[in-house]
């Protein structure tokens, strides 16, 4: 029986990891964003008008990182058809996270254009298909790996900017993540969004 050296085992593991990272990277690049109208732009800040959007969402508990990880895994399984009948659904961005009273997080994947509640595959346990109404959203864009402290600072900056342009806040802040967790922090794209009147 031939002996396999540790070098070959480690090389195989590295190749598998690289292939997995490449797959996620390509999915990340191919993901589509929802169409919106930019009503006002000011550097990293914008006010956008979004149409009604269909999302798959799950309510997860725990810290932001834990809730995002668990929610992302559950929703990705739905998108890729892992635990349901039917074809894989095209990936879209961003992944939305909305803090809930009591410490939970509502994690949302946007559904691709052309689907309705009736034409989407039936979601499994813990996932609900919801239509978000058309709304105007103030946004601030930023790069790097998001931390709780950075997200809080960006939300404060956005609230200050909203007041400076004479708009009224019309709901809770949401977080938007455009890249997979495998993408290096400095080249990630994130946003904080707040509904405005």
Image (spheres, helix red, strand yellow):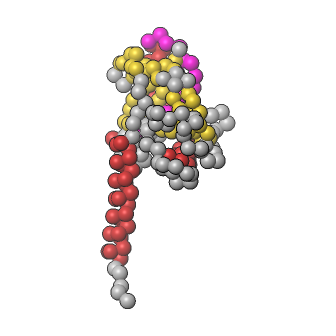
**Image location of residue 88, percent across then percent down:** 47, 48
Q: Position of residue 98 (x, y in %)?
A: 56, 34
Which quadrant holds residue 31? top left
Using the rendered image of the protein, determine whether residue 29 is visible from the camera's viewpoint: yes
Q: Answer with left or right where residue 118 lies relative to residue 24.
A: right
How far across and how far down the image is residue 155, in percent?
49, 27
- Left or right placement of residue 76 versus residue 44 in this view: right
Residue at 55% across / 24% down in the picture?
133
**Which quadrant would the N terminus be assigned to in this image?**
bottom left
Dominant secondary structure of the residues highlighted in magenta in the image: loop
User: Total label count?
Assistant: 0
Front-lying residue, 189 or 94: 94
* 166 magenta-colored: yes
Q: Residue furthest right?
A: 102
Foreground of the two, 196 or 53: 53
Residue visible at 50% across and 35% down? 115
38 to the left or right of 134: left
Q: Write the start and end of the magenta stretch as one range.
A: 165-178
Examine the rendering and report whether any part of residue 185 can be seen. no
Residue at the image point whose x is 50% and y is 46% from the top: 79
- The image shows residue 47, relative to residue 59, as above or below, that is above
- What is the x, y in percent for residue 167? 49, 12
Magenta-colored stretch includes residue 23: no
Q: Nearer the viewer, residue 102 or 22?
A: 22
Check the image and name the residue furthest to the bottom: 1
Residue drawn at the location 44% of the way across and 25% of the way down: 139
């Amino acid at each position: 029986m031939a002996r396999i050296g540790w070098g070959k085992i480690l090389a195989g593991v590295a190749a598998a990891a690289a292939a997995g990272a490449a797959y996620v990277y390509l999915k990340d690049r191919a993901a589509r964003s929802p169409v919106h109208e930019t009503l006002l732009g000011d550097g990293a800040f914008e006010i956008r008008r979004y149409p009604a959007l269909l999302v798959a969402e799950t309510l997860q508990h725990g810290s932001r990182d834990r809730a995002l990880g668990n929610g992302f895994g559950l929703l990705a399984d739905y998108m890729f058809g892992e635990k349901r009948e039917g074809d894989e659904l095209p990936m879209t961005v961003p992944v939305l996270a909305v803090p809930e009273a009591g410490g939970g997080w509502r994690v949302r994947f946007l559904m691709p254009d052309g689907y309705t509640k009736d034409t989407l595959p039936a979601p499994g346990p813990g996932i609900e298909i919801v239509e978000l109404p058309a709304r105007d959203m103030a946004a601030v864009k930023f790069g790097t790996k998001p931390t709780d402290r950075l997200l809080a600072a960006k939300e404060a900056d956005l609230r200050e900017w909203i007041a400076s342009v004479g708009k009224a806040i019309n709901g809770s802040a949401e977080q938007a993540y455009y890249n997979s967790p495998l993408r290096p922090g400095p080249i990630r794209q994130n946003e904080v969004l707040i509904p405005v009147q």
